[in-house]
Image (cartoon, grey):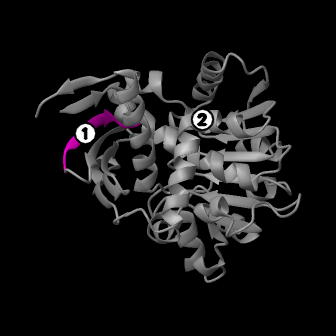
């Protein structure tokens, strides 16, 4: 029997705090060699500026594969940019246990890993957040920052200002308990100049802010670009960062456009990556070392993060009797 879970059902069961705990646990398991993560397959559809990703992974008792499509022109068709499903399999019996909507979970697990990186790398008193790019992915990025740092001000920038204003309204509705101040900015550099933490959540192919806007002590989560031709950050930004932490070194070598382009200049090398985020979790590498350190977390996405949240959702669905059960 297989459980089918819709996005609405998942959202009623599983929150950011759950995802942070589950992703942090799987990062530790991964460092201990207990997680299988084959290289993901990316199919590109250049005529639509789109891609479909196939991402398998396995733990001791469960495996999962996520299929996620990213079609950036879909809003013009009144359809979501990102759509996905996850299939969960029992590795002892081979039974397919669940199929669940992965659109929200993709945003949630990416937010969770940003939260984990931020917990270790951002200043403990970081209270001002800049959000560059206010699409759907930014929703869970904001939730993640609220979960790990005492945010009192947000500075929002989007190329279309109306979308930033709509995002500000979303924050108020989604987080009614948060009583901080929101500023919608006309300029990305001005947003970054104010911030202790910067979120870059765009599909840009050119840098989204100037390196001169970056202040000492800032932490950056760059999670938008995930293909070699994309570039949210300037090469000078990569060079200026005191420490660079990534989700996986192998993943960013193939997919992190700004890092690839920085290495191509000959002025920076992948050897200069300080750590994978899992090494911070296990204590193999230290977190923030001094107040004025500029830290960068670059994430392109790893299938094990999807496995972590899928297992967490499945467990909660069984405990609470949620989802539709079918026989294949």
Q: Nearer the viewer, residue 37 or 217?
A: 37
Give how far across and how far down residue 308 sits, in percent: 45, 47
Front position among marks 1 and 2: 1
Residue 95 is covered by the magenta coloring = yes
Q: Is residue 203 visible?
A: yes
> What label does residue 17 carry, if any?
2
Crowding at mark 1 (Cα within 10 Å: few <14, some 14-19, many 20+): some
| Residue with the most extreme bottom position | 266
Residue 15 found in image quarter: top right
Left or right of 293, for residue 84: left
Q: Which residue is mark 1?
A: 97
Q: Is residue 187 above or below residue 55?
A: above
Residue 84 position by quadrant? top left
Q: Earlier in the sequence, mark 1 or mark 2?
A: 2
What percent of the width, then of the height, locates residue 50?
33, 48
Where residue 42 is drawn, which disc sits there? none
Q: Quadrant of the C terminus?
A: top left
Q: Are marks 1 and 2 in contact (CB under 8 Å)?
A: no
Question: What separation in Å lies between label 1 and label 2 (alpha carbons)?
Answer: 24 Å
Secondary structure at badge 2 equals helix
Indicate whether residue 47 is drawn in magenta.
Answer: no
Crowdedness of circle 2 by 10 Å Cα count: few (<14), some, many (20+)?
some
Q: Position of residue 291 (x, y in %)?
A: 89, 57
Per the picture, the main secondary structure of the magenta-coloured stretch is: strand
Write down the region rendered in magenta.
Answer: 94-103
Q: Nearer the viewer, residue 93 or 118?
A: 93
Q: Quadrant of the N terminus?
A: top left
Query: Residue at left 49%, top 63%?
Result: 30
Q: Is residue 89 above or below residue 300?
A: above
């Amino acid at each position: 029997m297989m459980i089918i879970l819709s996005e609405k059902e998942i959202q009623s069961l599983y929150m950011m705090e759950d995802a942070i705990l589950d992703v942090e646990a799987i990062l530790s398991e991964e460092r201990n060699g207990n997680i299988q993560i084959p290289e993901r397959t990316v199919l590109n559809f250049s005529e639509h500026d789109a891609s479909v990703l196939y991402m398998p992974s396995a733990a001791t008792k469960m495996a999962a594969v996520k299929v996620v499509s990213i079609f950036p022109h879909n809003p013009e068709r009144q359809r979501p940019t990102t759509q996905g499903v996850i299939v969960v399999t029992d590795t002892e019996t081979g039974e397919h246990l669940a199929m669940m909507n992965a659109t929200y979970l993709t945003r949630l697990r990416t937010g969770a890993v940003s939260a984990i990186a931020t917990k270790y790398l951002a200043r403990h008193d970081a209270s001002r957040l800049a959000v560059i790019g206010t699409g759907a992915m930014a929703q869970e990025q904001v939730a993640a920052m609220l979960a790990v740092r005492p945010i009192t001000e947000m500075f929002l920038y989007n190329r279309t200002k109306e979308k930033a204003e709509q995002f500000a309204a979303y924050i108020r509705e989604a987080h009614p308990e948060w009583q901080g101040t929101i500023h919608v900015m006309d300029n990305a550099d001005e947003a970054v100049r104010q911030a202790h933490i910067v979120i870059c959540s765009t599909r840009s192919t050119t840098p989204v802010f100037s390196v001169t806007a970056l202040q000492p002590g800032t932490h950056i989560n760059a999670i938008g670009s995930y293909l070699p031709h994309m570039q949210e950050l300037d090469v000078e930004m990569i060079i200026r960062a005191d420490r660079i932490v990534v989700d996986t070194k192998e993943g960013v070598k193939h997919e992190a456009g700004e890092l690839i382009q920085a290495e191509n200049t000959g002025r920076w090398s992948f050897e200069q990556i300080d750590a994978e985020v899992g090494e911070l979790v296990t204590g193999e590498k230290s977190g923030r070392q001094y107040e004025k350190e500029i830290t960068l977390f670059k994430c392109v996405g790893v299938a094990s993060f999807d496995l972590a949240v899928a297992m967490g959702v499945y467990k909660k669905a069984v405990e609470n009797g949620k989802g539709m059960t079918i026989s294949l």
